[in-house]
């Protein structure tokens, strides 16, 4: 797998305050990369630096081998992006908006325009003014606009913001499709943890301008998985399982331990042999929410 | 680059800016034509319709008498001779000097709109050229294309130039067509006096000569276009710096109006002549009206405006290229 977008030690200082404190990460071809953090963690600022809207104080961004600072046009040609809301010209039609942005590319064809319109499923309303579009349609048009130049990297800032549940699911499927079929690298930022969990292959967790952790979503989740045991005698059960694993505590009258799939049956056997009645064994995958709070220590933004 | 300029022109046209400007000019020209028509009628009523010929003849005789009398300076004599030439031309070509044709109306319209009306029209187009992209959020899309920032701004500046050309053209065509319907379309060769210079308190008439009206008009339109471009560039700079179109409009309006007021009262505050807004009445130098502050000449005013425009242009590009977009 090749890296399409590489970020090295990116920093941004505004006034005396360091807002982004040395980020490094890279995007692989065909993966959806999540950017997770609470509001104010510096997600949007980072994304703006990735697309050249904000100049980093130090550090490097390279896209498909081109340095964003020194070879701006070559680098940005491989990027499609929506930064925050997809704001387009409301007094032009969807088609005219696309034409407008296509004219800014080194070359474009009517066929490519038609293609992206079909890809986002806007063909019925494309000649209406954008003023009359719903938010979901604007979001689609925004994506169409980002895909015009056949980018290698797609950067979407809060792509499901303001969409209804059906729209959110469609968007999710669409993003997965782009990554899997078209082999795009997609960077998605969100403060909605469930979103990232459903959509992304890897995730970077960000707080206060720093990346706390980058890992596969699955690994992260597995690490934090728990098992909830419902037994008739908590004290005795704890004593027995302490010899096998770490007992993390109790919750709602249930004992909590780590989740180890191949050990579960053995542990249960031990309990039963000791005469403890086990009425429930419930493995529970943590939500990223739990994870996030654990990793950041439930920090608030200051 | 052509594609970029096309984009910008498309946006200006689709926002109906040029249409609105044409409509405003058409309405105003209609209004002024009617006012002028009333005025001419009034004059004719006072003097009698057939009388203007005798009146002119009387004036010519007066001038000749004055020329023959001794004790007038050489300069004054020369000036009177030119006046005589002009009056003779009116008489020979059967032109009533108080009843203007369309070119005369156009000339007056340009002279009177150069300070406030024309800059105002330019502002309508230019004020939101950049600021609307910032406030509408489309700036983010515009700047994430494989096009360098200076090219994007240059395309907008060129679009501004094209729009100003359109405004000038609309001004000429509409004022000629509409006023001509009332006053007739002739009068291109009417001789007009120019070449006045002001020295101290006195009007120096040493270089006064006659030029045909079409030449006179061409000079005035050239000066008006220059003023429009300078005012456009200043508005352009504010539009780059500020997100709010209303703020851009407000500041430019305040500057222009203060210029009109200052022109009437700053004669003793000499350094005010370096402000751009008291230098806008370039056509006054051609027709020989006294400048608001002693020592101002056509060259000086053009110089001051050029410096303001150039600085504004440099600031616009510098800010646009280096700014972080949030």
Image (cartoon, coloured by chain):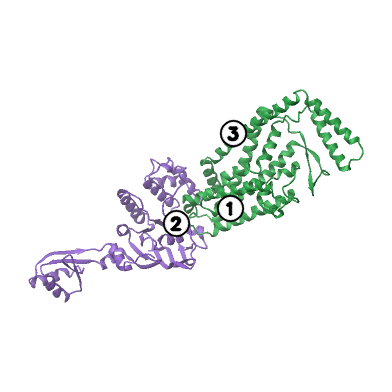
Chain colours: A purple, B green
Q: A163 or B102: which is nearer to us?
A: B102
Mark earlier in primary sequence (3, 1):
3
Image disc number at residue B27: 3
Mark 3 neighbour class, 10 Å CA radius: few under 14, some 14 to 19, many 20 or more: some
Image disc number at residue A197: none
Q: Chain of mark 1?
A: B
Q: Is residue A295 above or below residue B226?
A: below
The x, y position of residue B71, in whole percent, is: 91, 40
Q: Chain of mark 2?
A: A
Of badges 3 and 1, nearer the viewer stands: 3
Which residue is the site of mark 2? A79
The x, y position of residue B258, in whole percent, is: 63, 48
The x, y position of residue B60, in whole percent, is: 84, 31
| Secondary structure of the residue carrying numbered label 2 | strand
Q: Quadrant of residue A273?
A: bottom left
Mark 2 neighbour class, 10 Å CA radius: few under 14, some 14 to 19, many 20 or more: many
Q: Is the residue under label 1 in contact with that under label 3 (CB below 8 Å)?
A: no
Q: Is residue B125 above or below residue A83?
A: above
Residue shown at 24%/66% (left/top)? A225
Q: Chain of mark 3?
A: B
Image disc number at residue B237: 1
Q: Is residue A190 above or below residue B232?
A: below
3D distance between C-alphas at marks 2 and 3: 49 Å
């Amino acid at each position: 797998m090749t890296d399409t977008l590489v970020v090295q030690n990116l920093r941004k200082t505004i006034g005396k305050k360091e807002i982004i404190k040395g980020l490094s990460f890279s995007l692989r071809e065909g993966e959806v990369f999540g950017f997770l953090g609470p509001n104010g963690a510096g997600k949007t600022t980072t994304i703006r630096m990735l697309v050249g809207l904000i100049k980093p104080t130090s550090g490097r961004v390279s896209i498909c081998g081109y340095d964003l600072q020194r070879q701006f046009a070559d680098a940005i040609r491989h990027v499609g992006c929506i930064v925050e809301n997809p704001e387009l010209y409301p007094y032009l039609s969807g088609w005219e908006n696309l034409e407008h942005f296509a004219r800014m590319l080194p070359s474009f064809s009517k066929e490519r325009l038609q293609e992206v319109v079909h890809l986002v499923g806007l063909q019925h309303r494309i000649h209406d003014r954008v003023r009359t579009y719903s938010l979901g349609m604007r979001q689609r048009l925004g994506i169409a606009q980002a895909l015009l130049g056949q980018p290698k990297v797609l950067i979407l800032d809060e792509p499901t913001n303001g969409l209804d549940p059906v729209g959110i699911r469609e968007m999710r499927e669409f993003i997965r499709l782009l990554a899997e079929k078209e082999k795009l690298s997609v960077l998605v930022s969100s403060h909605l943890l469930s979103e990232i969990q459903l959509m992304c292959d890897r995730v970077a967790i960000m707080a206060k301008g720093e990346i706390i952790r980058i890992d596969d979503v699955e690994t992260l989740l597995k690490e934090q998985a728990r098992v909830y045991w419902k037994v008739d005698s908590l004290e005795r059960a704890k004593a027995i399982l302490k010899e096998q694993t770490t007992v993390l505590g109790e919750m709602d009258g249930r004992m909590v331990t780590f989740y180890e799939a191949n050990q579960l049956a053995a542990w249960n056997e031990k309990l039963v042999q000791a005469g403890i009645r086990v009425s429930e064994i419930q493995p529970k995958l943590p939500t990223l929410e739990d994870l996030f709070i654990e990793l950041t220590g439930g920090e608030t933004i200051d | 680059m052509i594609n970029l300029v096309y984009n910008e022109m498309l946006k200006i046209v689709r926002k109906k800016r040029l249409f609105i400007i044409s409509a405003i000019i058409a309405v105003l020209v209609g209004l002024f034509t009617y006012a002028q028509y009333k005025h001419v009628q009034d004059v004719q009523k006072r003097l009698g319709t057939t009388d203007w010929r005798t009146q002119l003849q009387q004036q010519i005789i007066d001038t000749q008498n004055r020329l023959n009398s001794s004790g007038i300076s050489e300069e004054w004599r020369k000036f009177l001779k030119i006046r005589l030439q002009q009056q003779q031309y009116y008489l020979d070509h059967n032109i009533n000097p108080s009843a203007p044709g369309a070119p005369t109306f156009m000339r007056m319209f340009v002279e009177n709109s150069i300070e406030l009306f024309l800059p105002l029209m330019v502002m309508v187009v230019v004020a939101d050229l950049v600021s609307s992209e910032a406030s509408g959020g489309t700036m983010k899309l515009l700047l994430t294309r494989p096009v360098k920032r200076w090219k994007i701004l240059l395309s907008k500046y060129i679009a501004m130039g094209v729009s100003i050309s359109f405004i000038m053209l609309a001004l000429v065509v509409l004022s000629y067509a509409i006023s001509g319907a009332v006053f007739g379309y002739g009068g291109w060769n009417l001789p007009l006096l120019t070449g006045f210079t002001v020295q101290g308190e006195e009007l120096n008439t040493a270089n006064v000569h006659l030029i045909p009206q079409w030449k006179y008009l061409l000079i005035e339109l050239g000066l008006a276009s220059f003023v429009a471009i300078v005012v456009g560039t200043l508005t352009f700079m504010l539009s780059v710096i500020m997100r709010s179109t209303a703020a851009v409009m407000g500041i430019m309006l305040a500057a222009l109006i203060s210029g009109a007021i200052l022109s009437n009262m700053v004669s003793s505050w000499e350094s005010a002549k370096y402000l751009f807004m008291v230098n806008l009445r370039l056509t006054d130098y051609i027709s020989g009206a006294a400048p608001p502050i002693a020592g101002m000449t056509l060259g000086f005013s053009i110089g001051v405006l050029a410096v303001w425009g150039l600085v504004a242009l440099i600031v616009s590009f510098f800010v646009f290229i280096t700014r972080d977009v949030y």
